[in-house]
Image: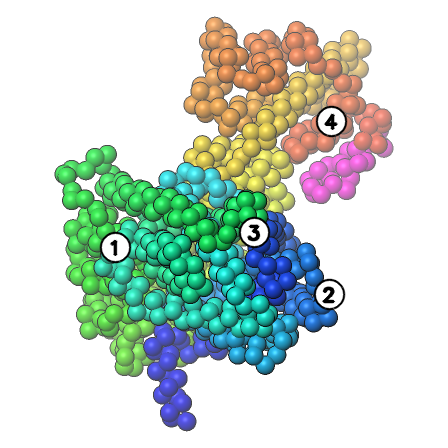
Amino acid sequence: MHKIEFIKSYALRVFDIKEEELKKTLLLQLNIFLIITTLLIVKPTVNSLFLSELGSNALPLGYVLTAIAAVIGSYFYNKALEKAQLNRIIVFTLYISITSLIVFGLAFKYQMAKGLLLYIPYIWVAIFGLLAASQFWILANLVYNIREAKRIFGFIGSGAIAGGISGGYITSILAKFMEAEDLLFVAALLLLFCVPIVRYIWKKEVLKLNTFQVGLRSSTESENSFKLIQKSKLLSLIAVVIGLSVLVAKLIDYQYSDYASTLIEDPEELASFFGFWLSTLSVVSLIVQLFFTKKIVGMFGVGKSLLWLPTGVLLGSILLLIVPQLWVVVFIKIIDGSLKQSVNRAATELLSIPIAIDIKKKTKTFIDVVVDSIATGIAGFILIFFINGLDIPSKYVSLIIIGLISLWIYLILLLKREYINAFKNLIININGNKKPNKVEAPITSIVDSVKKVFKTGTENQILYMLKKTLEIKDNRFFYEIQPLLNHSSSKVRALAIENLYFLSKENLCQQIEPMVHDSDQLVTTAAFRYLLKHYEMDTIQLFDKYLTSNDLTIRNAALLGLSLELRNHEKLQLEFDLEAKIGTVLVAISELTDPTIVKDKTLIVLASIGNGKVTKYYSAISKHLHNQDQEIVRMALRSASKTLDAQFIDDIVKNLSKKDNRDSASEALLNYGESIIDILTKNTIDGKFKMEDARLIPSAIAKFNSQKAVKSLITLIESTEHDIKIEAIESLRKLKWNNSGLEIKDRLIIDKILDECNLYQDTLAAIHSQIVTQYKKKDTNNESALEKKARTSLIELLENRLDRQLKRIFKFLGMKYPPEDIDSVLEVILDGKEEQRIHAIEFLDNILDIQLKRELIPIAESTLIDIASEERVKKLNIRVPSELECFTNLLQRNDNKLRLAVLNLIEKTNDKKFIPLVNLYTNDQNNTLKRQANLVLKQLFNA
């Protein structure tokens, strides 16, 4: 028993896993092991049966169909994810996959899968490999937060490597004892074990997460990934180089399959061959990854390391032209398979250092799926043309490969040069200088250039690079980061500790423990987190010592570090008794009299409650969201957002209208992730926020800077009153001009402008309808003083709405044309002299397209004419409605103040003909309007 505990303890320490994470981690590792094992049993089996029946000439069409199926399938799969829970989709996918494997097995066994039908299992295998692995990692990202994932994903990923090794060897061994099609039943059985694992993980780990946690842990994707890639020359080159590597790999795969199927005709032997070499490739790739990748990249630099894969394939392809033997093709396949996932991948990751992390996240799926699919399709078309069309022997595909590799190598050289330019520009931009102050040594190695920044860079450069190395977690930077613990900047010291937290070169507890006495709390907090993870003796005793220290700063930092490190770890929170420790501080605060100490302790305890998600004391956060001290309120806002609890959203929104707290409140909403956008939008439309807060919601939503934010702002424009609508238009306009990666269609803008033009004309028609009615009643002395006053109020309100609508028209126009030009035109039209207004209208006439000119110019010209003038109505060709039509149209608008003014006027008319119209609003959703409608109805009946 002691031995088992010792082994368990040793394993947890070596693999950097906390004890309470062990069960779910092992289950997820088993899950990916089963998925990859299944894939490596199915892939060689189906490929062997496909090639034995149709031959290698069928592969090009298979590549094309696979590419098409992947793109179409990806679209419908994303749609399904929007409508159904992930666990249901995963389980459904598993059941469909198991059923498919059984159906394929039976079809092969009873010789029903013949001819073109064989493309179905062939394409299915490719899609299954992509989909199953993708679903697994989405699930894993929900189970772990970013910090946990950085520690654990390497260990879980080893399950995929083990599956890659075992699956092919299992196929190779079993193929000697059973028919190839029977292997599909074995694969179905293995896959069946994944179902209870997924259900258990979902029930125990995912269901306890709220909407915001799920949203933050889900991958961020953009509908405009292509635009983001297009904007970045570096990212474009990376995408093209990856696409070329896939294209070459597919051509190699064709040669490999062709030679193998020609020499090995028996399906069982062919399945055994494919299985053996698939697993062998995984073994070789693992060996290269473990023992050679870092040495190669470290010794040769990233640029030269990228050349290893194409150079190796190039040499193999030349050799194949001279010696057209199967062993040469296997050699090429080994080079491609082993270097692609090791040296080439590590080098490519380092190349993306100058690219912002959010851009990388938004474009990753596009590059992994779309670029891969396009390259696969192109490979198919090339082979169809050369092999099927021109009937060229497969060994001469090497000539195509050699040509593509020449382009590949050229692009790698361009890529390295572009990286250097991007890196230099980045360093210059971080300094805020347009030109470097001195001529610097040329950047020749990516790793060396990063190390150089750590040694000689400015504070801002070092901080930026520490954030980038935090993304890639590379031990090669350990000895350059370690000296930064003594840097003069506290921000650098804190971020250096954060980096070293994830690196395993040496244990630095002896060097970092004295840093708990640092004068900066960021440093001391980071130091406590490091100690909690790496301290080899009793950490509880260590923290108890510091939590009872006489130094207030150390006590505060110890509590903060503890709360941060124990977040989401209930067992460790109980072990360290975090809840009781926070309770003790809260009691101590209530007994203190020194306001400075009270404030310091309050700030720390609020931060600790939020960091640790200590639900028992959420009431303390709620209480201090209304504190008189605005610094405490701002800390309470940050703490509330860290809990990701929906109960705080309303209180956070209430702080938007408080100028001192506005930025903190916006930041707090941003911390909830994009999932909060739907809640903010719905509550704004439903009128659940006060107007002073609601009108600031659009700018808070715009800070998400995403396509979802664009969609939400459009919804607010369509569904809210003017004050909110105008803010939403302004926020949308800023997004349009500040972020070209977001899609705001011109057609939408034009439609909105035209809608506002129609509304403007309807408002003008309503004004004239009321003026006409007023004149008629004046002539007949049939208008009471109260009715006249109500009608005058309505006309004034409509005139006010006319100005609003004109502003909205020009706000929308500022999305299509430069806003600085459009804003100045509006200013002149509203307040300029007549001659200036004429010039402004002429300017509009020159820039507007035909459709907008037809609608807008008459409106702009009409502002030169008095509002009550008949000439204005004639100029716009407006039909003046009857009084009943006017009231009907105005009551249908989403403008409560205007609707109440109409009801008020109807009441003063005492005219029973309006009863059916008023009756329509006695059950309106707006309580104020409903109440007013019922009062008016009662008054009309009594008239």
Q: Is residue 929 magenta?
A: yes
In the figure, residue 807 lies in which quadrant? top right
Which quadrant of the structure image shows residue 284? bottom left
Q: Earlier in the sequence, mark 3 or mark 1?
A: 3
Q: Camera-side residue: 456 or 116?
A: 116
In three-dimensional space, the C-alpha distance between marks 1 and 2, rounded to whole angstroms, equals 54 Å
Mark in the foreground, 3 or 1: 3
Residues in magenta, as a range: 918-943
Q: Are marks 1 and 4 in contact (CB under 8 Å)?
A: no
In the picture, the disc for residue 112 is 2
Quote the CA–CA distance across marks 1 and 4: 71 Å
Q: Which numbered disc covers residue 932?
A: none
x and y percent of residue 188 in the render? 63, 73
Label annotation for residue 889: 4
Does 570 lie within the magenta span? no
Query: Helix, strand or loop at disc 4?
Result: helix
* CA separation in Å, label 4 and label 3: 63 Å
Q: Are marks 2 and 3 in contact (CB under 8 Å)?
A: no
- What amino acid does circle 1 point to? Gly
Of the residues shown, which amino acid type is indicated by label 3?
A: Pro
Residue drawn at x 36%, y 83% is 9
Q: Residue at x 45, y 32 (%)?
A: 737
Total tally of numbered discs in the picture:
4
Residues 846 and 371: in front is 371
Mark linked to residue 301: 1
Q: Nearer the viewer, mark 4 or mark 3?
A: 3
Q: How many other residues sit within 10 Å of disc 3, few (<14), some (14-19) or many (≥20)?
A: many
* Colour scheme shown: rainbow
